[in-house]
Image (cartoon, helix red, strand yellow):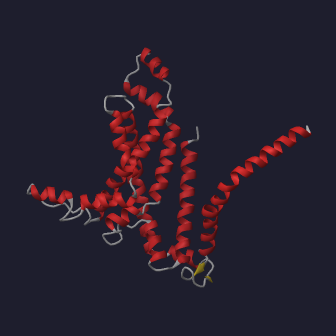
């Protein structure tokens, strides 16, 4: 009995020693900033300067701040329009490349390649395509004698531009997750359904979709979190405009922190965003994985 306990203790100590480097970095770069940001949200003052304790004043001001509610609404709007589109397109592309047709290996690479680009490169590409007067699409429409399309001149077109750029950039990652799920489904289930005379739609609805339930839940949660953190696309493509109509919450936090240097209020808004993401993710997890 004592020998067994001694072996368990040695195994535990060995695991802790191997995990220690990761845990130290994890606590230092992930846990500590969350704790530090929460403390900062109760203070006022510029970054690096003297901090004054103001209690709940930052949170109280947030409730009456129209820019906060505007940027929060813009973030929710982007989640609503982007998450279903990217999840459904990711599934369609995964089904397409999983059909093992000729050339699907090339298609898989083409679809996933944009995800390898940094946000700055992606933004530069879409600015080159969408920019008024000197953009690629404007040049094409002008050469065809057609009226120029202002992709960045209204909030509708601004959001559409951000949505198209985001889909092009990220749908390949979701496609790979769905593809991994599709390749885990045993072939004998489809062979049995063929014997029973099931058609393509029935096989998709009663075999493929239930088998992908876990992957679908994961993709929805990850995509929702990514949409909550929208920043680079609006910063590079629309600059948050026209006006503030395409300014999401992270964009607003950046303006507070690094343009107004109000770290206390920026920390308060960031912490509210953190809690919102955690709450929405918990609801999605409970709802999507309840069976």
Q: Residue at x 60, y 67 (%)?
A: 33
Q: Is residue 144 above or below residue 109?
A: below
**Residue 238: quarter of image:** bottom left
* Front-lying residue, 32 or 39: 32
Q: Residue at x 86, y 38 (%)?
A: 4
* Front-lying residue, 140 or 240: 140
Number of on-image labels: 0
- Give residue 277's position: percent from left, percent from top: 53, 58
Quarter of the image that includes the C terminus:
top right
- Give residue 232's position: percent from left, percent from top: 40, 62
Q: Is residue 93 above or below residue 164?
A: above
**Does residue 17 appear to the left or right of 63 in the view shown?**
right
* Front-lying residue, 21 or 123: 21
Residue that extends furthest to the top in the rendered view of this protein = 195
**Residue 241: quarter of image:** bottom left
Quarter of the image that includes the N terminus:
top right
**Does residue 84 appear to the left or right of 144 in the view shown?**
right
Q: Residue at x 56, y 51 (%)?
A: 283
**Residue 107: quarter of image:** top left
Q: Is residue 46 above or below residue 119?
A: below
**Does residue 196 appear to the left or right of 52 in the view shown?**
left
Residue that extends furthest to the right in the rendered view of this protein = 2
Q: Residue at x 47, y 17 (%)?
A: 192
- Give residue 61's position: percent from left, percent from top: 52, 78
* Front-lying residue, 6 or 188: 6
**Does residue 30 appear to the left or right of 126 in the view shown?**
right
């Amino acid at each position: 009995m004592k020998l067994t306990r001694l072996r368990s203790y040695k195994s535990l100590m060995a695991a802790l020693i191997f995990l220690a480097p990761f845990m130290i970095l994890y606590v230092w770069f992930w846990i500590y900033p969350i704790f530090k940001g929460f403390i900062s949200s109760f203070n006022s003052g510029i970054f690096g300067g003297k901090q004054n304790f103001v209690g709940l004043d930052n949170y109280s001001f947030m409730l009456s701040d129209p820019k906060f509610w505007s940027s929060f609404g813009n973030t929710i709007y982007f989640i609503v329009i982007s998450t279903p589109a990217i999840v459904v397109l990711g599934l369609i592309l995964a089904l397409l490349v999983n059909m093992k047709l000729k050339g699907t290996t090339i298609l898989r690479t083409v679809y996933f390649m944009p995800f390898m680009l940094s946000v700055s490169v992606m933004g530069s590409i879409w600015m080159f395509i969408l920019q008024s007067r000197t953009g690629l699409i404007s040049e094409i429409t002008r050469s065809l004698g057609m009226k120029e399309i202002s992709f960045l001149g209204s909030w509708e077109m601004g959001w559409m531009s951000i949505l198209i750029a985001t889909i092009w950039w990220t749908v390949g990652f979701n496609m790979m997750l769905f593809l991994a799920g599709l390749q885990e489904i045993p072939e004998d289930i489809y062979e049995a359904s063929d014997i029973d005379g099931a058609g393509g739609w029935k096989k998709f609805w009663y075999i493929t979709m239930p088998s992908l339930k876990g992957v679908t839940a994961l993709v929805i949660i990850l995509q929702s979190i990514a949409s909550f953190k929208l920043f680079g696309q609006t910063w590079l493509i629309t600059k948050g405009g026209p006006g503030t109509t395409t300014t999401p919450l992270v964009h607003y936090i950046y303006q507070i922190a690094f343009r107004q240097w109000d770290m206390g209020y920026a920390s308060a808004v960031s912490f509210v965003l953190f809690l919102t993401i955690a709450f929405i993710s918990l609801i999605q997890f409970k709802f999507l994985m309840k069976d």
